[in-house]
Amino acid sequence: MAKALDVLCLGELLVDLVSKDGGRTFTCCAGGAPANVAVACSRLGLRTSFIGKVGNDHFGRFLIRAVADSGVDTGGVRVGETGTTLAFGYAGATG
């Protein structure tokens, strides 16, 4: 019998695009509060799985890989035909 999960998170999984140079370049990061919780729990040694949906695009594949590389089971992530949700942010000179 497979070991039961310790944590199951479901909800948004999105890409945070953050610029520190006024929007000329962006750093791509996995984000979304439920996904962040899943990654944190996995890093604490808990058996964690995530349920959510990403788009059928480069960003969606990036997110699945990033979360899975953090030790989270992504078998519950579905790929839809719409684009992946993106959030844009700007970090000023003082952060």
Image (tube, rainbow, N blue to C red):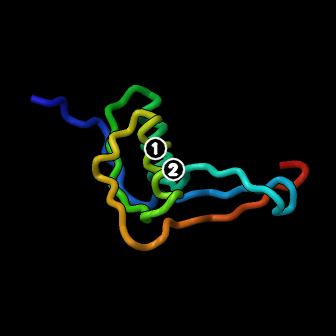
The foreground one among 76 and 48 is 76
Query: What's under tag 2, amino acid-wise?
Result: Phe
Location of residue 73 (image quadrant): top left
Q: Are marks 1 and 2 in contact (CB under 8 Å)?
A: yes
How many numbered markers are drawn? Answer: 2
Q: Residue at x 50, y 54 (%)?
A: 33
Location of residue 80 (image quadrant): bottom left
Q: Is residue 40 above or below residue 27?
A: above
Q: Residues within 10 Å of mark 2 (few under 14, many from 20)?
A: some
Residue at the right extreme of this rendering = 93
The foreground one among 54 and 92 is 54
The foreground one among 95 and 26 is 26
Residue 94 percent location from the top left of the image? 89, 48
Residue 51 percent location from the top left of the image? 33, 54
Residue under pointer 2: 62
In the drawing, what numbered circle is on residue 65? 1
Query: What's under tag 1, amino acid-wise?
Result: Arg
Residue 66 percent location from the top left of the image? 50, 43
Q: Residue at x 40, y 33 (%)?
A: 71
Q: CA distance from mark 1 to mark 2?
A: 5 Å
Location of residue 3 (image quadrant): top left
Q: Is residue 4 above or below residue 18?
A: above
Residue 20 percent location from the top left of the image? 82, 53
